[in-house]
Image (cartoon, rainbow, N blue to C red):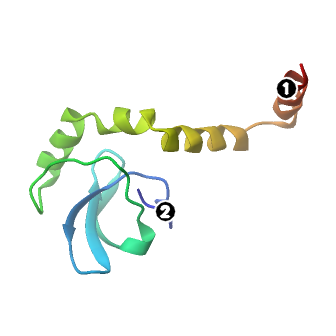
Amino acid sequence: MINYGPDAGKLAVIVDIIDHNRALIEGPTTGIARTAYAFRRLTLTPLVIKVARGAGQVVLKAAIEKQDLAGSWAKTSWAKKIASRAQRATNTDFDRFKLQKYKKL
């Protein structure tokens, strides 16, 4: 998962390791083009996909869909926490008021 920049929060797959500081990543289902990213801009998730080193976009997309990466990610507590934060950020004043009253019951 990318943790910094305009693509922060999107999932990507490490296709190849360039050196000890950078990796080649791609996210065909999340709109991430094949790009070199610094490891400090990435956060590893427990999800693993078995593909050959330097696999092409078609092979990578097929492997992601076969293993249902999006579904597996959505089931993790990490993804649920991110979704919860996003939902709370979009709440209006009235939504926060209703939640406050509901919690007091």
Q: Give residue 81's quadrant in the image.
A: top right
Look at mark 2 in the image and give the residue it sits on: 3
Residue at disc 1, secondary structure: helix
How far is disc 1 from disc 2 in space, using C-alphas? 32 Å
Residue at image location 25% in from the left, 48% down from the top: 48
Q: Is residue 95 left or right of residue 5?
A: right
Which residue type does callout 1 highlight?
A: Lys
Look at mark 1 in the image and give the residue it sits on: 103
Q: Give residue 55's quadrant in the image.
A: bottom left
Which part of the image, by quadrant, shows the C terminus? Answer: top right
Q: Is residue 90 left or right of residue 12?
A: right
Q: Nearer the viewer, residue 20 or 5?
A: 20
The tag on residue 88 is none
Q: Give residue 38's quadrant in the image.
A: bottom left
Q: Position of residue 95 (x, y in %)?
A: 82, 30
Badge 1 vs badge 2, beta-carbon distance below 8 Å: no
Would you place residue 32 above or below residue 58 in this image? below
Residue at image location 32% in from the left, 80% down from the top: 21
Q: Is residue 104 left or right of residue 6?
A: right
Would you place residue 103 above or below residue 56 in this image? above
- Mark nearest the camera among 1 and 2 is 1
Q: Position of residue 2 (x, y in %)?
A: 43, 60
Q: Nearer the viewer, residue 55 or 31?
A: 55
Residue at image location 66% in from the left, 37% down from the top: 87
Which residue type does callout 2 highlight?
A: Asn
Q: How many marks?
A: 2
